[in-house]
Image (spheres, rainbow, N blue to C red):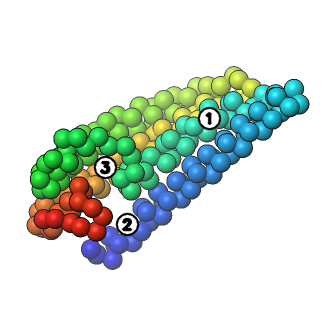
Amino acid sequence: MSQLGQTLERAWDSLLNGLAYVAGLLVVAVALSVLYEVVARYFFNSPTIWAVDFTEYSLVYITFLGTPWVLRDHAHTRVELVVERLRPRLRLVLGMLVSLAAATGAVVMAWEGAWETWESYLGGHAELKAWRVYRWPLILPICVGSFLLVVEFLRQACNNLGMLSRGDPIPDESAPPGQDSL
């Protein structure tokens, strides 16, 4: 891989790691806010007006900022009942096709998210709950996260295609860790 390619890959990985870190911090903040809400409500009879809204808004950020990192690390839930029975080369081709199909779906989500974000921004739409906040910052992560998913899906498809075209050894994901079969 060229020096530029390595630099871009490191930058991409740093971006996804940073966004996953932010998502992780939000998970902690949500947990603490729910704990605070429970204690305030049940021990002091003084519920908050902000904890539920904060949780709702944070869940969008957690989901869409963390998902590209999860995809990159193959940490998502996968049903492999059929796939694990395929030969490694066929599994690689299927993975490439699935990545391309998923990228297409993520393009639609990114487009719709961008459109909705732009419309909300132009219209000055606000959420009228405990906090009065503009809507566009709340839905912006849908657009950003979906775009990052598109890039990661295409990256994975290109990696699979590269392995196929170069004739690289194909790892057998059903083998125990450290044991690859060709």
Earlier residue among tags 3 and 2? 2
Q: CA distance from mark 1 to mark 2?
A: 30 Å
Q: CA distance from mark 3 to mark 1?
A: 26 Å
Left or right of 119? Residue 25 is right
Residue 178: % across, % down: 28, 68
Amino acid type of the residue that numbered disc 2 sits on in the rendered structure = Glu
Element on which disc 3 rests: helix
Instruction: Indicate the quadrant containing the N terminus: top left, top right, bottom left or bottom right.
Output: bottom left
Quick check: 149 above or below 9? above
Q: In which image quadrant can residue 80 be found? A: top left
Instruction: Indicate the quadrant containing the C terminus: top left, top right, bottom left or bottom right.
Output: bottom left
Q: In which image quadrant can residue 139 be found? A: top right
Left or right of 3? Residue 91 is left
Is residue 11 among what the camera can see? yes
Q: Residues within 10 Å of mark 2 (few under 14, many from 20)?
A: few
Q: What residue is drawn where x is 65% and y is 25%?
A: 127
Q: Read off the residue under disc 3.
A: 153
Q: Read off the residue under disc 1.
A: 57
Quick check: 164 above or below 42? below
Q: Residues within 10 Å of mark 1 (few under 14, many from 20)?
A: some
Name the residue at the bottom extreme.
Answer: 3
Circles 3 and 2, Cβ within 8 Å, touching? The answer is no
Amino acid type of the residue that numbered disc 1 sits on in the rendered structure = Tyr
Earlier residue among tags 3 and 1? 1
Q: What residue is drawn where x is 17% and y is 51%?
A: 91
Element on which disc 1 rests: helix
Q: Read off the residue under disc 2.
A: 9
Q: What residue is drawn where x is 47% and y is 57%?
A: 16
Residue 140: % across, % down: 53, 39
